[in-house]
Image: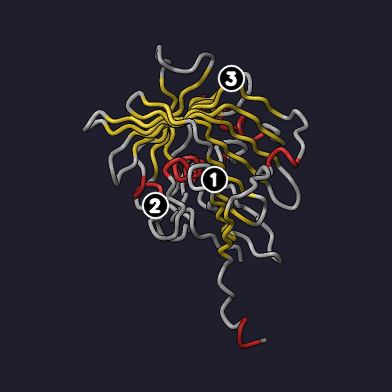
Amino acid sequence: MMRARAVACVSVIGLIITVANGQTSREAGPPASRPASEPASQPAPLDPAVERILDRLEIKDVRDVQADLVYIKKDPLINYEQKYKGILRFIEDKPSPRFLIRFDQCIIEGVVEKEKEWHVFDGRWYIEARERSKQVIKREVVRADEKADDLFRIGKGPFPMPFGQKKGDIVRHFTIKLVAPAPADPPNSDHLECTPLPATELDRRYGKVHFHIDRTLDVPVRVATVAKEDKQEIIASFSNVRLNKGMAASDVNLPSLPGYEVREEPLDEPAGAAMQK
């Protein structure tokens, strides 16, 4: 059975939250991720308008995605904001989906730092590289003889992405309502307010999760929430979204980084495996 460590992501925006905060180091990072708890009660009946939006999301054939990414984390108590700008690439590759996130700059208190940072999943390894430290860290997420089934689904795997989610998975983990449009919303979008069901892992970690769904593309173009632990606001925005353009698998590879130190952290052997040798 696939196990994941090093990245603790249990929400639709979990991947983006974690990589942007640099929480993937073993020393400072959270414990291994686990599937969100199943809700104790059955979800309430859906508003027909919400159901139509979720149906569009589910039937959308997402084979590959390219987008510009802006990730913002705000601490309203001290009026402190971090903004990361970069790109996201995702491909429904075989045998496992793969992704690359590259941050090109970080803006804090108006100061721009232009040092690249990469976060890659190659189907087996979660790879983190930072220009500042000249270091690449590879953490094994899926064993060589395992399949990465459900790796990107809400409540199932460590890398839930905001594209291609199943309606049933969303309904099992959230109470959902359609919110009236507001001036600050992305243009041509529907706003879904998703409240995690009580006593679930999502409920313990996050407040309401806001999805803004583009009506033409039928994919999220903004995801926002508040982390319960530190009360910080988190916003991930996708622009210039390109779907199903025939992206090559090599486009989600970590680029060659000469001179970088490389460290590998394989998964521990399964219980009993050592005794069988």
Q: Amino acid at mark 3?
A: Arg
- Residue that lies at the very extreme toward the front in this rendered image: 259
Does 23 sit above or below residue 87?
below
Can residue 223 be seen at all in this image of the molecule? no
**How packed is label 1: few (under 14 Cα within 10 Å), some, or many (20 or more)?**
many
Q: Position of residue 103 (x, y in %)?
A: 52, 35
Give the quarter of the figure containing the C terminus. Answer: bottom right
| First reached walking from the N terminus: tag 1 or tag 3 | 1
Helix, strand or loop under label 1: loop
Helix, strand or loop under label 3: loop
Q: Which mark is residue 160?
A: 1
Can residue 196 be seen at all in this image of the molecule? yes
Frontmost of labels 1 and 3 is: 1
CA gap, disc 1 and disc 3: 22 Å
Question: Label 3 belongs to which residue?
Answer: 215
Q: Residue at x 62, y 56 (%)?
A: 125
**How packed is label 2: few (under 14 Cα within 10 Å), some, or many (20 or more)?**
some
Whether residues under marks 2 and 1 lie with C-beta atoms below 8 angstroms apart, the answer is no
Direction from residue 272 to residue 197 in the image, left or right: left
Instruction: Tell me how the rendering is colored.
Output: secondary structure
Q: Nearer the viewer, residue 184 or 111?
A: 111
**How packed is label 3: few (under 14 Cα within 10 Å), some, or many (20 or more)?**
some
Q: Residue at x 44, y 48 (%)?
A: 42
Q: Amino acid at mark 1?
A: Pro
Q: Amino acid at mark 2?
A: Thr
Frontmost of labels 2 and 1 is: 1
CA gap, disc 2 and disc 1: 16 Å
Question: Label 2 belongs to which residue?
Answer: 200
Q: Position of residue 191 (x, y in %)?
A: 46, 24
| First reached walking from the N terminus: tag 2 or tag 1 | 1
